[in-house]
Amino acid sequence: MYDSIKVYADLHPKPVNIQYQYGTAGFRTLGALLESVIFRVGVLAALRSKKLDGKTIGVVVTASHNPEQDNGVKLVDPRGEMLESAWEGHATTFANAPSSDAFIVAVENLVEFAKIDVSKPAKVVYARDTRPTGPLLIAALEDGLKAIGAEGRNEGVKTTPVLHYLVRCINSKGTDEEYGVDSEDGYMKKLSGAFRKLVTGKTPSGLLIVDCANGVGAPTAELLMQYLGDSIPLKLANTAIATEGALNNACGADYVKTSQKLPPSLSGVLRAGQRACSLDGDADRLIYYYMNERNQFRLLDGDKIAALVAAFIVDLVKLSGLEDRIDVGVVQTAYANGASTKYLSERLPVKCVPTGVKHLHHAAEHYSVGVYFEANGHGTVLFSSTATTTLIKHRPSTPAQQTALNHLINLTELINQTVGDALSDMLLVEVVLAHKSFSGLEWDSLYSDLPNRLVKVVVKDRNIFKTEDAERRLVSPPGLQQKLDELIRKYDGGRSFVRPSGTEDVVRVYAEAILRPQADELAFKVAGLVYDSTGGDPMAHDS
Ligand code: G16
C-alpha cells in the first residue's frame, strides 16, 4: 500500500511555500493550488473509511460561495454530517507534508495513532460542483483512492446536500434508521413526495423566483421541478453554469446577504410584493427576499427562516399533543441579528455557537427537534431518533392532533437532516408560508431586523486573530478587544465582533446598531481598528 501511495503521490507534488489549513468547511483556496491536497484527501477519506469498518465516506469538491477560481473540499462522515473535528488536524498534517516521503510518514503516523486496520475495505462516494477546476481535482482524488485501493463511487456534478444525503442513505441501508434510496432520484422523490403531502389543500403563495447563483443548484433545481410538477410555481434565474466567471458573480445567497441587495439580474424582474430566493454555489445556503409596496428590497435571511420554521414546528408539536415529550430549540451564531435572538429567546431555548455548520449541527442534536440556521442561510432542522420514534408511535386523540402529527412526520421527510440544503429548505419555507397564508411582508413582520453591516478586512496574517465566547470576543491580538469595547459603547444598541474567516483569507467584521448610519459607521471604525492593530488593507470592503 505504501509503495503505491508513494508512486501516486509523486504525480501530485505539494507546491512549495504554501501552507494549507482545514478551515470552517474543509480546505479552500485557488483551485489551481489544490491538486496535491485533493489527492491526499482521497487517501485520508479511505483511511477514515477503514477506521470505521468500511463505512462509506463522502467527499465534495466545491468552494461553495467563494469566487469561481477558488475550489475546495468538504469531507462527509457516515451519517452525512461533517468530518469529525479530531480528523481535521490529520487532514491539515496530510496537506502540508512537504514531500511524498513526508506524506508517507504522515500516513504511517495516522495509521498507528488511530489504530487503523489497513486490511479493512474502504469506500468513498464523491461529487463536485460546476467549477472549471473540478474535473482535474476529481482526477487527483481518484488517484488518491487508487493509490490506497479504495472503492470509489463517482456521483459527477451534484449539490453538496445531495452528496450528504447519499452518504447517509448508503450507510443506513438495511438498518432501522434507513434514510432513503441512495440516488438523486431517491432524493428527489423523498423531498417532492413529502412536499406534495404537506401542501395538499393549500394555495401556493404565487410564483417563486429562484436565483441559482449560476451553479450546481441550477440543474438540480430544474430536475426537482419535474418531480414537483404543478405543486409549486417556480421560475429559475441565473442558471448559466457554462458561462465563464458567472458562478456566484453578482448573484447567489452570499451576494444577496452581504450586499443586502437584489442580484442586478433580477432588477426589474421582481415585482412589488413578489418574493424570490437565492442559493449559493453548492446549494447548501438559502436567502429569501421580496420587494415591498414601495418597491424596496427586503431581506429574509437565515435568522428569519429560523424564526418562521421554529414557530411553525412549536405550534405543530403543541397541536399534536406532544408538547411534554418533544422539546424544540434553536441554534445560532454571533452573526444572528440581535432582534432575531430576542424574538426567538422569548419563545424557546436559543444557543449561540461558533461559525460553521459542524458546530451548529452538534449543538442542535441536544434537542428533540433542533432548528439551526446561520444568518447566511446555512441550516436545517434535526429530529432526534427518540423524537422520530415518538412521532411514529404517538396515537392522537383528536383528528386535529392527527393532522398536526402527519405534518410533523412529513416534515421529517421533507427536511434534509444531514446538512443545510437550500432546495429542501426552500420547500420547507414554502410549506410554512402556504400553511400560514403568509406573504413575504407578513413573514418579515415577525420582528424587525436591527440595521447591520458585514465587512471584510485583508490582513497580513489572519491567524493572529483568536476568539472566545462563541467568537463574540477577541483574545488576540492583545488589547484590541478593549479598544473595540470602548468604541461599541458609544453606539446605541451597538454590537460588533471580529473573527478570522475559515473559508477566505480575510478577517470578518460584523456590526449592528439601532440606526443604519450607526451600524455602518461602527463596522467601518472596527475595521479601521483591525487594520491599525495589524497592518492590513486600508480598503476594508463590503463582504
Ligand atoms: C461555509 C460554512 C458555513 C460558514 C461559511 C463562512 O459555508 O459551511 O458554516 O458560515 O463557510 O465561514 P467563514 O466566515 O469562516 O468564512 P459555505 O457555504 O461557503 O460552505
Image (cartoon, rainbow, N blue to C red):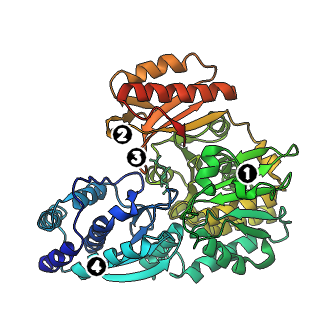
Q: Is residue 518 left or right of residue 97?
A: right
The spot of residue 318 in percent (x, y) is 71, 52
Residue shown at 26% from the left, 68% from the top: 40
The circle drawn on residue 505 is: 3
Badges 2 and 3: C-beta atoms under 8 Å apart?
Answer: yes
Q: Earlier in the sequence, mark 1 or mark 2?
A: 1
Q: Quadrant of the C terminus?
A: top right
To which residue does mark 2 refer? 462
Q: Earlier in the sequence, mark 1 or mark 4?
A: 4
Q: How far apart are the two marked residues, 1 and 3, measured between alpha carbons?
A: 29 Å
Amino acid type at circle 2 is Arg
The spot of residue 68 in percent (x, y) is 50, 61
Q: Answer whether residue 118 is visible to the viewer in this image.
A: no
Along the line of sight, which residue is nearer the eye, 47 or 344? 47
Q: How far apart are the two marked residues, 1 and 4, measured between alpha carbons?
A: 43 Å
Q: How far apart are the two marked residues, 1 and 2, measured between alpha carbons?
A: 32 Å
Q: Answer whether residue 86 is visible to the viewer in this image.
A: yes
| Labels 1, 3: front one | 3
The spot of residue 20 in percent (x, y) is 29, 54
Say if 543 sits above or below 18 in the image: above
* Corner quadrant of residue 221: bottom right
The circle drawn on residue 143 is: 4
